[in-house]
Image (cartoon, rainbow, N blue to C red):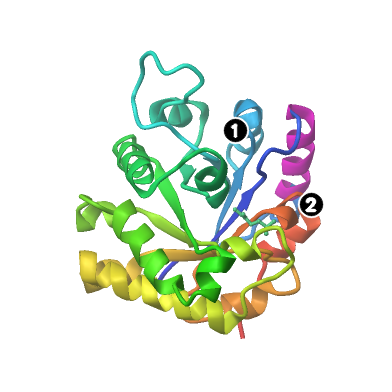
Amino acid sequence: MRTPVIAGNWKMHNTVAESLKLVRELKALVLGVGGVEIVVAPVFTALGAVAAEIKGSNIALSSQNVFWEEKGAYTGEIAPGMLKDVGCTYAIIGHSERRQYFGETDETVNKRVKATLKAGLTPIMCVGETLAEREGGKTLEIVSRQVTGGLAGLSSAEIDKLIIAYEPVWAIGTGKTATPEQAEEVHADIRRLVGEIAGPATAAGIRILYGGSVKADNVDILMSQADIDGALVGGAALQADSFARIVKFETK
Ligand code: 13P
């Protein structure tokens, strides 16, 4: 039984005060909701304040990125242990915006995943193809390369602790959701690949989230797919009511 995960990636939005307002509203709306891991990923500057606000609640905290070294002369970077110290239990890694604008590669994603696991945080490792790659019939090839590269050198026990998020780049912030069938096809392929890498038990247990224009009105059908175990939500996570509705998804 895979516990679903609904994670809100707030991206580069919200001051500390705005983040607190949003998470307070959310906390009230999801009070008592169980059977789902609810995660928010504010900007770094709001992590401490949001951590204090959600203490003792059913909402968990994630960063949007993490560096792989523990400490040292790496100006501007933040170590996994520092994220844990501020109250994070998850770290988003390798988001397509980081791959696109900040030069992330499968190799750096892999380093971040390893360091994050070592610090005892749960990595949410993102993969996904661009529109050109999908139109060129390369979706499964690209996603396989990203998954294989991201998981390189990890044991099955380590992979057990990790979450994968499939986010087709063409569906992010565009309002174009992958159809449930398109998403399910890739999710099933990722699960098959994890089985090849880490064995059937790990494949059966790993959570694979879908991301890309997930909204209150399409989450139910997406979550009804056999291999979709949650959602990584951008825009719709910035409003407490729409994110709360996504958290309260209903499968058919
Ligand atoms: P949108 O939900 O805004 O499409 O963003 C998805 C995403 O990138 C979440 O990480």
Residue at image position (50%, 79%) is 184
Mark 1 neighbour density, 10 Å: few (under 14) some (14–19) many (20 or more):
many
State the image quarter where residue 101 is shown: top right
User: Magenta stretch: dominant SS?
Assistant: helix
Magenta segment includes 17 = yes
Instruction: List x then y, in percent, for residue 214.
Output: 67, 65
Instruction: List x then y, in percent, for residue 18.
Output: 79, 34
Residue at image position (75%, 73%) is 217
Is residue 154 among what the camera can see? yes
Mark 2 neighbour density, 10 Å: few (under 14) some (14–19) many (20 or more):
few
Instruction: List x then y, in percent, for residue 5.
Output: 53, 60
Residue 60 higher or lower than 250, as above or below: above
| Residue 187: mark in rendering | none
Element under disc 1: helix
- The quarter in which the N terminus is drawn is bottom left
Is residue 35 among what the camera can see? no
Instruction: List x then y, in percent, for residue 167.
Output: 54, 62
Amino acid, disc 2: Gln
Magenta segment includes 162 = no
Q: Quadrant of ligand 1?
A: bottom right
Relative to the observer, which residue lies in front, 190 or 59? Answer: 190
Residue at image position (67%, 53%) is 234
Q: Mark 2 points at which residue?
A: 239
Q: Name the residue under label 1.
A: 51
- Could you tell whether 216 is left or right of 220 in the image? right
Magenta stretch: give its range: 16-27
Whether disc 1's CB lies below 8 Å from ligand 1 is answered: no
